[in-house]
Amino acid sequence: MKIFFAFIILYLFLANPKNNSLQEDGLNGKIKSITEYQYSGHNDFRCKSYYLFDKIGNIIERKDSFGGDGTFNGDFKYEYQYNKDGNKIEQKDYNKDGTLSWRTSFIYDDNDHLIETNRYKANGDFMEKVMLKYDSLGNNVERNSYEGGVLNGKGIFRFDEYGHVVDCESIGNGSIDKYKKSSHEQWKYNASGHLYEYVRYEGEYLLVAEKYYDFKYDKSDNWIQRTSAIHKASISRDDTEITIRKIVYY
């Protein structure tokens, strides 16, 4: 799941208020769990991810395993807590040995928009703050990250008329003062609202990678197989990823 899935990370910041985890990820029905297996085009195993949801539809646990035969050996684990309104208020990330890696807290405004996250080391030391801004439609259009009270990263997002994120400009790595883009990402969707293309650029539109998707769906319109054709322009290499989903419903 961590391999070239930059768009998935956006859901932390682009989630609509009052949506549960399933709705934020565009999933349908009462899902209990999802297990994903990712392979290369040569059928080599890359990673396995497991997601557990409560009956409300919020994710309460996630596990990731990379390489090997795909069996879970405690590589990575994530746990989530929610308040009475169903808003995620804490996430704990664990190391492969089961020790806490870091903890993230989430703060919301009166409209249940996520407006601030704070990340802490296992010993409680502060690591990073992220501040979020929204437009009049509730879309998260800006994200600013701070370390040591200093702005060190900015993301500016644009959306289509259906609320899909279609463009993100990221600024960082010491370029904040100069307002120089460090990366630029674009997403395209078909008429059904399904993602079919992702493109990433570095600097001033230097193409780094392109990713094209083909999906198979179950009767609930949730994808159960995703084939990703990848072109990595920076190293002139083409690749294929196949992700198989096993979905268990309540």
Image (cartoon, helix red, strand yellow):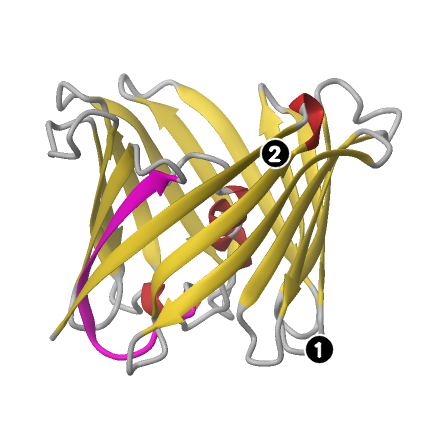
- Say which quadrant the N terminus sits in: top left
Disc 1 designates what residue? 161
Q: Position of residue 30 (x, y in %)?
A: 21, 77
The dot on residue 145 is: 2
| Residue 211 screen position, x and y as percent | 59, 47
**SS majority, magenta:** strand
Q: Secondary structure at mark 2?
A: strand
Q: Which residues are magenta?
A: 26-40
Above/below status of 181 relative to 221: above
The reply to whether callout 2 and callout 1 are in contact (CB within 8 Å) is no
Q: Residue at x 33, y 67 (%)?
A: 22
Q: Is residue 13 above or below residue 170?
A: below
Q: Of discs 2 and 1, which sits in the foreground?
A: 1
Spatial CA distance of label 2 from label 1 is 27 Å
Residue 35 covered by magenta stretch: yes
Give residue 119's position: percent from left, percent from top.
41, 31
Where residue 226 appears, as percent x and y from the top left, is 41, 57
> In terms of depth relative to the viewer, which is nearer, 100 or 235?
235
Q: Is residue 232 magenta?
A: no
Q: Earlier in the sequence, mark 2 or mark 1?
A: 2
The residue lying at 66 percent from left, 22 percent from top is 235
